[in-house]
Image (cartoon, rainbow, N blue to C red):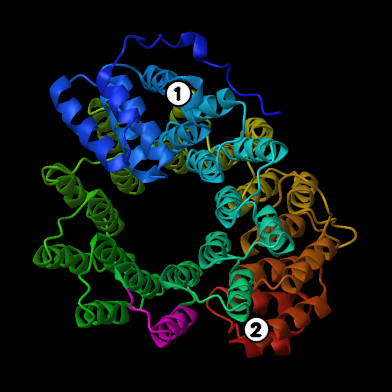
């Protein structure tokens, strides 16, 4: 049995038991229309003060006549009025008490189901749970669905399952809507395994899957980037004879847009037109965003032209996507011009627009212009942490830490507290400047404020300490990061490997590499382990190869070089230089020749950096003829 908050009947004030002629008249009416007429007349006479008995009586009459929507609206009206003078919990107690005040023979459980529905819609889920607990019997399925949905909207997904199990134990027969709510809850949590399980259970229980259910699951899969699975469900939907609606198409198009598959997004656009559906502003916004993501800005602008053809006015999202696209290719002037175009449609820049523009100006080192833009944000738009962080990042990249801290101070003065990103940006900048004292000062301030440093902050600190020779502190921070439950990313791994190798701890670097990548250096087998994991990139491999080469461990270096190639990573010129130096120091003629051949195969032409190394390598092994051919 679900354990909810204790019944709150004890907390209720008792309703007046004195006769109320209007309430009695309402209860004795022959029709709900007549009852509503008396109610409306009586409430006007009573004045501003809400009469609980009148609301209780009319609610019971409406529910008995199955006019649930009207009853729910009146309950919500009463609660909202009470919230002006007391807390939500007390307001709900008073309403519950009023509905319970009638003679037992006149009280219907459906009344409390309507109350649960109203409270859930208002976001007062805890109060709705108390009503559910006090009822003692299972409310109507619609009320159960509303309560489950209320928990999903609040993000209380464990409570959703707990409540659903309790409802089933009380005899709930789940409907299609119930399953839709459960699937939505699972998808919101990213639990696609259970979402699919619930989805597959529906036909087994004789419940037909609707377009809403299919689309909820498709949307969840698209959110997680699992487009093959989403497409599979879409095809099943078609086979089952369920016609996709515009929401279905928009979800799929958005999913493909997020993975930069513009071609498939356009195929879906063509299909929805073939199905006779009219694209809306969301559809066009997705296409604009998709084109901007891949830098196809002319195509994105042409989509705005399509919108005019269909009589759909662009909205803020469409223009922000376009502005972001131009910002991404550093055409900030065009991005600024788009804000003028927006005004033609009566669209004024919002905080997202300003944040994009400020970031764009900072990216082309016009940080002072960005600062002036922040100062001149139009009236009615409040800058947020994202806006300030963009500017702080701009000053940090210019190594103007004094101005960065000044902006940080300004945001604090207007009530915006620096967040993890603010601190991480400042810490990273100080670490790059090798000012570890200032960086650690900010790190300590984060902890005092109760902010947990993120992977960016830890990676910057680890790298900074390695580069200033403080291996012990770098080790301590890497251990602390793992204990905090943070997963190292590829940059963290590269910093660890590079730092350890350059500080003469190549064996430790190999151990860290094997542990974090889950690859056993002796067996080439990926370990099946729980915990953190990240895939190395060519920078990580190159750092390890260089460390081993310096230690004259060229055979181990060669093994990691081959692992790098097998994993599909392409070595760059520096990687080849490191390997060549290692081989000629070890006087491995065959190794040098194979590397040279591999470079040719990979299309890497000896450059001004590689040629001297390759020439010297051949000279070291006595192959003067090959050395002469290099230049």
Residues rendered magenta in the picture: 263-279
Between 630 and 353, which is closer to the camera in this rendering? 353
Find residue 547 and report its horizontal and vertical position in percent. Answer: 72, 54
Left or right: residue 499 versus residue 223 is right
Find residue 613 and report its horizontal and vertical position in percent. Answer: 64, 73
* Residue hosting label 1: 445
* Residue hosting label 2: 602
Find residue 59 and report its horizontal and vertical position in percent. Answer: 36, 33
Query: Which residue lies at the image location 24% right of the left edge and 48% below the top edge?
Result: 351
Q: Dot 1 surroundings within 10 Å: few (below 14), some, or many (20 or more)?
A: few
Look at the magenta stretch and give its main secondary structure. helix
Mark 2 vs mark 1: give the one in front: 1
Q: Residue 411 is drawn in which quadrant?
A: top left
Give the mark, 2 or 1, whose residue is nearer the N terminus: 1
Between 246 and 164, which is closer to the camera in this rendering? 164
Query: Which residue lies at the image location 69% right of the left edge and 36% below the top edge?
Result: 170
Q: Dot 2 surroundings within 10 Å: few (below 14), some, or many (20 or more)?
A: few
Compared with 516, 8 (above or below) is above
């Amino acid at each position: 049995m679900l354990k909810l908050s204790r019944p709150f009947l004890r907390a209720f004030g008792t309703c007046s038991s004195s006769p109320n002629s209007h309430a009695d008249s309402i209860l004795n009416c022959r029709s709900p229309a007549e009852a509503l007429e008396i109610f409306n007349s009586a409430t006007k006479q009573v004045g501003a003060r809400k009469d609980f008995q009148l609301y209780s009586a009319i609610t019971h009459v409406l529910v008995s006549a199955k006019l649930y929507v009207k009853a729910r609206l009146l309950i919500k009206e009463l609660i909202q009025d009470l919230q002006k003078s007391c807390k939500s919990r007390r307001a709900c107690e008073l309403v519950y008490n009023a509905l319970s005040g009638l003679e037992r023979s006149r009280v219907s459980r459906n009344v409390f189901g309507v109350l649960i529905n109203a409270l859930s819609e208002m976001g007062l889920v805890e109060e709705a749970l108390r009503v559910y607990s006090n009822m003692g019997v299972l409310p109507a399925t619609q009320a159960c669905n509303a309560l489950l949905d209320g928990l999903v909207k609040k993000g209380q997904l464990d409570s959703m399952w707990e409540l659903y199990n309790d409802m089933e134990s009380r005899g709930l027969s789940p409907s299609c809507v119930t399953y839709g709510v459960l699937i939505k809850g699972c998808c919101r949590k990213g639990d696609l395994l259970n979402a699919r399980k619930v989805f597959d259970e529906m036909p087994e229980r004789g419940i037909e899957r609707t377009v809403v259910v299919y689309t909820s699951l498709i949307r969840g899969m698209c959110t997680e980037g699992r487009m093959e699975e989403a497409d599979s469900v879409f095809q099943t939907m078609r086979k089952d004879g369920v016609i996709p609606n515009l929401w279905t198409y928009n979800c799929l198009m958005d999913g493909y847009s997020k993975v930069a598959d513009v071609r498939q997004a356009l195929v879906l656009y063509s299909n929805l037109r073939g199905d006779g559906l009219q694209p809306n502003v969301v559809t066009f916004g997705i296409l604009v965003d998709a084109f901007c993501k891949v830098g196809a800005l002319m195509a994105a602008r042409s989509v705005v032209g399509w919108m005019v053809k269909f009589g759909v006015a662009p909205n803020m999202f469409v223009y922000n996507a376009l502005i972001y696209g131009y910002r991404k290719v550093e055409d900030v002037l065009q991005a600024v011009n788009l804000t003028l175009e927006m005004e033609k449609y009566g669209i004024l820049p919002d905080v997202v627009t300003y944040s994009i523009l400020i970031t764009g100006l900072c990216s082309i080192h016009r940080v002072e212009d960005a600062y002036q833009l922040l100062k001149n944000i139009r009236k009615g738009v409040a800058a947020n942490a994202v806006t300030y962080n963009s500017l702080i990042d701009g000053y940090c990249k210019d190594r103007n830490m004094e101005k960065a801290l000044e902006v940080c101070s300004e945001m604090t003065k207007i009530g915006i507290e620096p967040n993890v990103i603010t601190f991480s940006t400042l810490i990273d900048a100080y670490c790059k400047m090798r000012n570890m004292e200032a960086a650690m000062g900010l790190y300590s301030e984060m902890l005092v404020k109760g902010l947990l440093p993120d992977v960016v902050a830890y990676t910057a600190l680890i790298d900074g300490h390695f580069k200033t020779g403080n291996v012990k502190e770098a080790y301590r921070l890497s251990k602390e990061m793992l204990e905090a439950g943070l997963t190292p990313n590829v940059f963290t791994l590269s910093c660890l490997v590079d730092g350890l190798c350059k500080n003469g701890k190549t064996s430790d670097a190999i151990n860290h590499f094997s542990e974090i990548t889950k690859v056993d250096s002796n067996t080439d087998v990926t370990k099946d382990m729980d915990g953190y994991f990240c895939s190395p990139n060519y920078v990580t491999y190159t750092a390890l190869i260089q460390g081993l080469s310096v230690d004259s461990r060229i055979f181990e270096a060669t093994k990691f070089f081959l692992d790098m190639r097998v994993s599909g990573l392409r070595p760059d010129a520096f990687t080849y230089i490191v390997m060549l130096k290692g081989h000629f120091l070890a006087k491995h003629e065959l190794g040098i020749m194979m590397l040279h051949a591999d470079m040719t195969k990979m299309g890497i032409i000896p450059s001004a950096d590689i040629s001297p190394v390759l020439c010297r390598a051949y000279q070291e092994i006595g192959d003067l003829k090959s050395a002469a051919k290099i230049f």
